Amino acid sequence: MYHYILFDLDGTLTDPKPGITGCVQYALRKLGMEAPEADALEPFIGPPLLDSFRELCGLDEATGLQAIAYYRERFSTVGLFENEAYPGITRMLARLREAECHLAVASSKPEVFVKKILEHFGMLPYFEVIVGSELDGRRVQKEEVVEEALRQLLGENGVRQAASGKIRDAVMVGDRKFDVQGAKQFGLASIGVAYGYAAAGELEEAGADSIVETVKELEEALLG
């Protein structure tokens, strides 16, 4: 059983596809570019936005930053609520808290939006720690987010112990390779959720310790 559990948000706790893809389309159109269909924009779900705009759309850094500004015009008022919690997630969180697990969210999404989304879905009370990126572009990489979440959960000494493999009851749960990589950086176990947005074979290739197909399987894995 895991006592310290870090969750990704997008593709793990909630399904954000309509909001994220709609805001990417909005940003690209504001730049005068053609906007692909929503399904083609699924790779935007998970990694930092600037990385995605540069790698998936071929934008340079300055244009990518402008794209982020346009994206947030829509996301801050409309897009963040074009989202839904995966069935069974709230029940699972309640059971984990009943089992005295310590829960955190570690997301590359700006922290201000993470908190609004969790509050919207009634999940906010279940988490002791909520960590996201900053709007100015700081702490966007998953490793940085995981480190800060561990620091808030366990303190500086806990971060060092985790990185040296001395904490065996902590786990990172996420749907993309970035979550697995962040877990490995700090000696955490990792559980990949196949119901999210990883490409075929992505979680296996990243080295997830286990992979679950449903929220029910995730609950069973976390409660042992």
Image: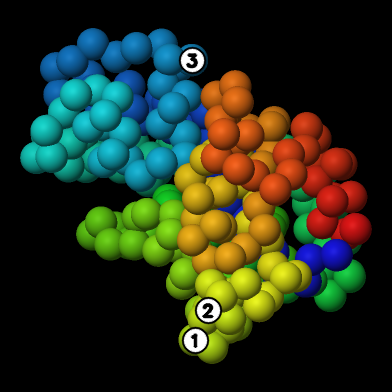
Question: Mark 2–mark 1 contact, CB under 8 Å?
Answer: yes
Residue type at numbered disc 2: Val
The image position of residue 179, as x and y in percent, is 54, 49
Between marks 3 and 1, how big is the CA–CA gap? 41 Å
Q: Which label sits on residue 109?
A: none
Q: Report the front residue among 133 and 30.
A: 133
Residue type at numbered disc 1: Glu
Mark 2 closeness class: few <14, some 14–19, many ≥20 residues within 10 Å: many
Q: Quadrant of the N terminus?
A: bottom right
The image position of residue 64, as x and y in percent, is 18, 36
Seen in the picture, residue 75 relative to 23 is either above or below; the reply is below
Between marks 3 and 2, how big is the CA–CA gap? 38 Å
The image position of residue 67, as x and y in percent, is 21, 34
Between marks 2 and 1, how big is the CA–CA gap? 5 Å
Secondary structure, mark 1, is: helix
Residue under pointer 3: 39
Q: Mark 3 against mark 2, which lies toward the viewer?
A: 2
The image position of residue 47, as x and y in percent, is 41, 41
Residue at 60% from the left image edge and 22% from the top image edge: 200
Q: What colour-coding does the image apply? A: rainbow
Mark 1 closeness class: few <14, some 14–19, many ≥20 residues within 10 Å: some
Q: Which label sits on residue 156?
A: 1
Tally of marks:
3
Secondary structure, mark 3, is: helix
Secondary structure, mark 2, is: helix
